[in-house]
Image (spheres, rainbow, N blue to C red):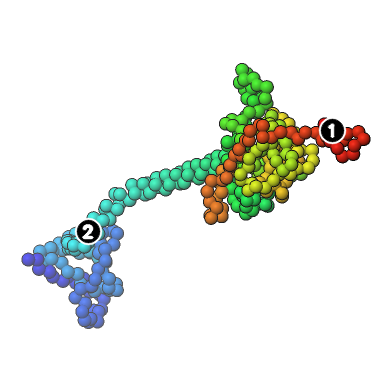
Amino acid sequence: MVHWRRMTQRDPADPAPPPRSGDDQWPSRSEPNGVVTTGAPVERDASIWLPEDDRLTDPAQEDAPYGERPASLISPPPPPAAPRGEQIYIDAWDGYAREVGPARSAARQRSTLLMGRELIETLMLALVIFIAVRGVVQNFRVEGSSMDPTYRTGQYVLVNKGLFARVNLEAVGRVIPFIDSDDNSRYLFRGPRRGEVIVFHPPLPNSYDRDFIKRVIGLPGDHVQVKDGRVSVNGRELIETYLRNVQTFCGGQWCDLQLGPHEYFVMGDNRTNSSDSRLWGPVPAGNVIGKSMLVYLPLDDFGPAPNQAPLMAEASSVASDPPPLAPTPGVSGSPRP
């Protein structure tokens, strides 16, 4: 057991300090120079506690400034208290966080970059698909009653543009020399067929920004004749069941014509109220946009677009009317034998 004693240093020339209570030991603080300075006010009379077996025999130590002592005389600090149970888990978690924190931050950055890359790729793919779809499919709104009762005003129709896509052989021939054709352009797949409902630009001045929807009646090279309420193609009458027994009349220069190699004769199903080839002539192949494919609005009419082909009667059933008979000379109103 170590016994402690109190050692007092005081200058004999100084008067004795007044008695103080509770001055047996002053709190001390450690200084950078390795000495301990008491926390009490600097006085000429102070007490320090030394172990009983450590005597101040060194004169230098005896003459040390008042209130200071060498660091060798300081008692060792008490051992740190053992951590509590929860502190162990806290310290372990802090160590784990210091180890895996940078790795998790890097992984989070990589995940953010991958997510941004996937988002950009998705947007680019959606844009490509949108452009491709717009190049093949187009929506069209029916306006007017020219196609009644097959199509009604206010219906929305999807038009297949890719079906009637055309290739400019002249431009292709400049790239591929051995391609030679009399036609400057051809259909990539096929052209419109009789009875199909197509959307096109009408061959009218100042109306190219407006699209029409009509039914194909005459194909390139056909001879179309509209007479006496009937429509005949190449001498054969068309049986159009979709008209519901409505006759077709025509008056003008486009009632009897021979179509060119790239021309189509079109008419609306509402023959009594339709602006079609009977008024402004055939439609050039370059003006055709596409085929009516699907009615998607209103929802009650949702379904495939009507594209019914007419039937062709026998050639003998459509005979040209005989020329009018001239009256017999001298006999008024009597036919010529």
Q: Secondary structure at mark 2?
A: helix
* Label annotation for residue 336: 1
Q: What percent of the width, then of the height, locates residue 43?
A: 27, 73
Q: Residue at point 39% right, 45% down?
A: 110
Q: Residue at point 84% right, 33% down?
A: 336
Q: What percent of the width, then of the height, locates residue 297?
A: 56, 53
Q: What percent of the width, then of the height, locates residue 183?
A: 67, 25
Residue 192 visible at all = no
Give the quarter of the image for residue 326. top right
What residue sits right under mark 2 in the picture? 89
Q: What percent of the width, then of the height, locates residue 164?
A: 60, 35
Q: Secondary structure at mark 1?
A: loop
Q: Is residue 78 above or below residue 16?
A: above
User: The disc labelled 1 sits on which kind of residue?
Assistant: Arg
- Report how far apart the C-alphas of labels 1 and 2 lie in the structure: 126 Å
User: The disc labelled 2 sits on which kind of residue?
Assistant: Tyr
Residue 1 or residue 139, whichever sits in front: 139
Q: Is residue 101 above or below residue 331?
A: below
Q: Residues within 10 Å of mark 1 (few under 14, many from 20)?
A: few
Residue 27 or residue 134, whichever sits in front: 134
* Label annotation for residue 62: none
Going from the N terminus, do you reach mark 1 or mark 2 first?
A: 2
Nearest-to-viewer mark from 1 and 2? 1
Residue 300 or residue 323, whichever sits in front: 323
Q: Residues within 10 Å of mark 2 (few under 14, many from 20)?
A: few
Q: Residue at point 72% right, 43% down?
A: 229
